[in-house]
Each structure stands twice: as C-alpha cells, then as structure tokens.
Amino acid sequence: MVFYTHTFDNGLRIIHHQIPSQVAHCGLYINAGSRNEKAGEHGMAHFIEHLMFKGTKKRKAHHIISRLEAVGGEINAYTGKEETCIYSSFLKEDFERSLELICDMTFDSIFPEKELAREKQVIIDEIISYRDNPSEQIFDDFEELVFSGDPIGRNILGTPANLKGFTRDDVIKFIENNYLTNQMVFSSVGNIEFKNVLKYAQKHLARIPENKSPADSNGMVDYTPEFKTVKKRTHQAHCIIGNLSFDLHDPRRMPMVLLNNILGGPGMSARLNLALREKSGYAYTIESHFTAYSNTGIFTVYFGTDREKLDRCRSLVHKEFDGMRKNRIGGMQLNKAKRQLKGQLTIGWENKENLMMAIGKSYLLFNRVDSMQDVYDKIDRITADDLLEVANIVLDPYSLSELSYI
C-alpha cells in the first residue's frame, strides 16, 4: 500500500492513497478537540464544528450544504476529545470542489451572530436528547468519574450554561490558539494522481497563513477507583466497569487491543457476549471498548440488563476478568484471536472512508502510517505473556471503577 505525503512551508501536511474507484474521500484533521478547552470553554470545540457550516466569506449556510450535495457528494464533521475532522465523499472528478469547500469552512468561516444564537439552541437540544439515552450518556459519565479533574473527562457537547455564554470573540480566540497549521493533516483516498492532489492542495492549503506551535504536552492523569450508583427512571439497569489503560505511544497498546477484542469485541464469540448473552440470556447488549489518548487510555465494559440481574451480570464480568488475569491463553486460542483481529481490521480498511480517516489520524499523531503488513507483524508478535501482563494491569480488581444506573 503506497502513501504519498508532502509538508507545506506553513507546516500543514497532506497524505494521499490512490485507489481505482469512481468515489473519493478526503478530510482535514485538526489536532484540537474538547481536551483543549480551558476553564469556561467547555463545549467550544464542538460548537465551532457546527458553526463551520453556517457561513463563510463567500458562502451562506445553504450554499455550503448544497455545494457537494448538488453533485451527489456529502460533507460532514465530528469533534473528538483530542481532534476535530471535516470530511467528505464525492465523485473523483469533484476532488477540488471538495477540498476547496473544506478549506473555506475551516479557514474562512465568519461566524454570524444570528447563527451563533440559533446553533446554541440546536446543541442544547442535542444535549437534552442525549441525556434521554442512558446507554450513551453512561459512557461520558464514566469518563468524568475516571478522569475526574482532567479536561479529557468532560463530555464533548458541553453544558447549556457554558454554551449560552459563548461569544463570537470567544470562538475566534479558540481557533487562533488551537487551529495550528503544523497540527493539521489533509488526508485523501481516491483515483486521483498525487501530482493533481498536490496541485490543488498547493492552491488551497499552502495559502493558509502559518500558525505554528508545539503540540500541548498533557501531564499524568490522577486516578482513584470510584464506585457510583445513580438512580434513573429507566426500564433497564445500565452498568460500566473499567479502568485506566495504555496511551497511544505505549508498546502495550496492541496487546490491549487484542485483549479487548477477546473479551468484548464486535464478534458474537467474544467471551463476555458468550457468558452474559448466549449462555445466560441476561443481557442483550454487552461490549467492551479500549480507547487510547495521547497520554492515557481507558478500558470499559458496558452492559444493560434487568435490575434484578445486575449482580449476576457483574459477577460474570468479573469471572471473565479473573480468567484473563490468572490463565495464560493457549497457543491455538491465541492464534485464533490474532486471525480474528486481523480480519476485522482488514475488512474495516475496505471501507475507503474509514481508510482515509485512519491514515489521516495516524499521520497527524505519528507522522507515519503503518501498512497492513506492519499491523499484522505487530499482532503476530503478541505473546500469551503479553496478554497476561496487560490483563493483570487493566483488569486488576482493586483498580477497577464502576458506574451503574438503576
């Protein structure tokens, strides 16, 4: 798999992978998210993502929406804890149209006052809607519990009180402080020759004024295990059990990915799914997640069940944890788990939008992209002892936190 890269004088980087397809995808990654918000800015990164669709120096909101839709394409964006991304899918002949639109939205938005007021209400409604969904809200509440006092623990949407206080000057100040050209990557995947990608990027990205700064280095996250129960008027009980885990740069990250996949990955054969759903019939949804951030990580197991079955589900989860900590996985099981993970990753990369995002984020964070063979090699090097080591760190019963809605 060949990746073409270039860095402009303003520090902005581009990465491109050419594929034989009529459809192309591209996106601009910005190394700034909700974690970059200072006191009083909670919700600002996500607010700005919304405002990018509300008017630029040369386009009104409806012109932004229709620019790609008119040719059958689509544009979207998302805000994460540590990044923001504006991305699009389109026919390959509309590559420059898409690139120009993304640049216009990112660098030439004007943030009209009337749109600020309107979008605040839209996001407040989004927050209210989100609070009505306990199976989603519990994840944010758990991260607030685990990362107490650290900006990474705050939810991305912010609070109605903070949103109401944001001004246009606040928006511009956040962008000036965090939208740094040497912390941006433009990623594309499509049947476009790199010389043409470079030509269009030179026209639209190289013109951006340099705004360089070292990436913020985040300190250690303080952690104390917490147990919390919240009374909710819901039909089900919802529960998350988890712990801090490994960061993006930790060599134990890949063994942790494999451990997570064995325990509660997307496959129906995951151990937690077999224990709680297939064998016991206690839970419809049981899943685990591992997320690595720049200086920390988090591992969670979530399940929803009838209230009277909560304790039984909790016991089964801890039983699976104990099994992973105390028993070295056999060679046949280990090879099966590795093959399963390789297959899932490869199938995921077959979605070319996912591929565009994956290489963009990797290039943003590491200034490189591992080939699929590189990833396979990392997986193949994982040993049973590696899994046992990470299991005894992350699944240590004295280090686990728990949040329940009942």
Image: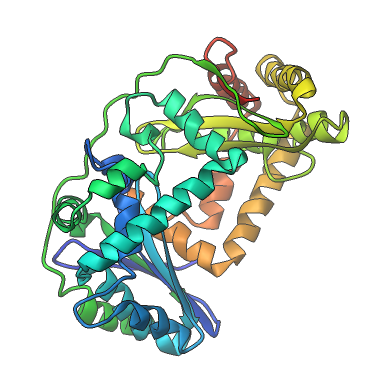
Question: As drawn, is 17 to the left or to the right of 149?
Answer: right
Determine if residue 364 is in view: no
Taking the spot 52% from the left edge, 49% from the top edge, the residue there is 129
Which residue in the rendered view is the most extreme toward the top? Answer: 398
Q: What is the total number of numbered labels drawn onto the structure image? A: 0
> Which x, y percent locates residue 403?
57, 23
Which quarter of the figure is the C terminus placed in?
top right
Inspect this view and state whether residue 369 appears. Answer: yes
Which residue corresponds to the image point at 23% horizontal and 75% vertical from the top-left? 56
**Residue 60: image location, x then y, percent:** 28, 80
Residue nearest the viewer, comparing 194 with 235: 235
Side of 142 relative to 233 (left or right): left
Compared with residue 27, is residue 344 higher up or lower down, i.e. above or below? above
In this rendered view, identify the residue nearer to me: 368 or 320.
Answer: 320
Q: Is residue 167 above or below residue 259?
A: below
Q: Nearer the viewer, residue 133 or 114?
A: 114
14 to 379, vertically: above or below:
below
> Which quadrant would residue 241 be assigned to in this image?
top right
